[in-house]
Image (cartoon, grey):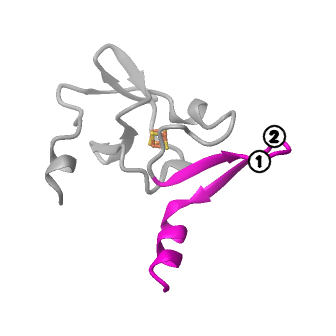
Amino acid sequence: MSAAANTMTTFEGAKAAEGGMLYKGMLCQPIIDKCEGCERTREFEGVNYCTSYPQPAAKWELGACNFATHVRAEVEAAGKVKINPLKASKRAARGR
Ligand code: SF4
């Protein structure tokens, strides 16, 4: 694992709470399926949470999360938001 990943936020001092965990006075909810693969997720007591947003589901309501590290949202000319998985594009670039 890289040094940068090791220094990223962990949930030190967090407490389990109903519906998620309490961290720095905020109720954080677990990540949603669309967050799977994002580097901003961290585990706390067996559940993954986002280090950037307390409510990941809300972050995806209007399209792709703008902080996601695994996908990139692109607004097409028609105004539709298209989500590009980065992993797939990296694989294509490597010729696999
Ligand atoms: S940054 Fe966005 S995609 Fe990544 S875990 Fe948080 S809410 Fe999910």
Tell me residue 67's x, y (percent).
Answer: 47, 38
Find the residue positioned furthest to the bottom.
96
Q: Residue at x 28, y 17 (%)?
A: 24
Find the residue positioned furthest to the right.
78
Is there a contact, CB below 8 Å, between mark 1 and mark 2? Answer: yes
Residue type, label 1? Glu
Q: Up-down: is 29 above or below 68?
A: above
CA distance for labels 1 and 2:
5 Å
Q: Residue at x 37, y 45 (%)?
A: 48
Tell me residue 54's x, y (percent).
Answer: 44, 27
Q: Would you name the residue on which mark 1 appears?
A: 76
For the N terminus, the image quarter is bottom left
Residue 90: in magenta span? yes
User: Looking at the rendered structure, which numbered label has been put on residue 3?
Assistant: none
Disc 1 packing (10 Å; few <14; some 14–19; many ≥20): few
Residue 68: in magenta span? no
Give the total of numbered labels.
Answer: 2
Q: Would you name the residue on which mark 2 appears?
A: 79
Q: In what element is the residue under mark 1? A: loop
Q: In what element is the residue under mark 2? A: loop
Q: Which residues are magenta?
A: 70-96
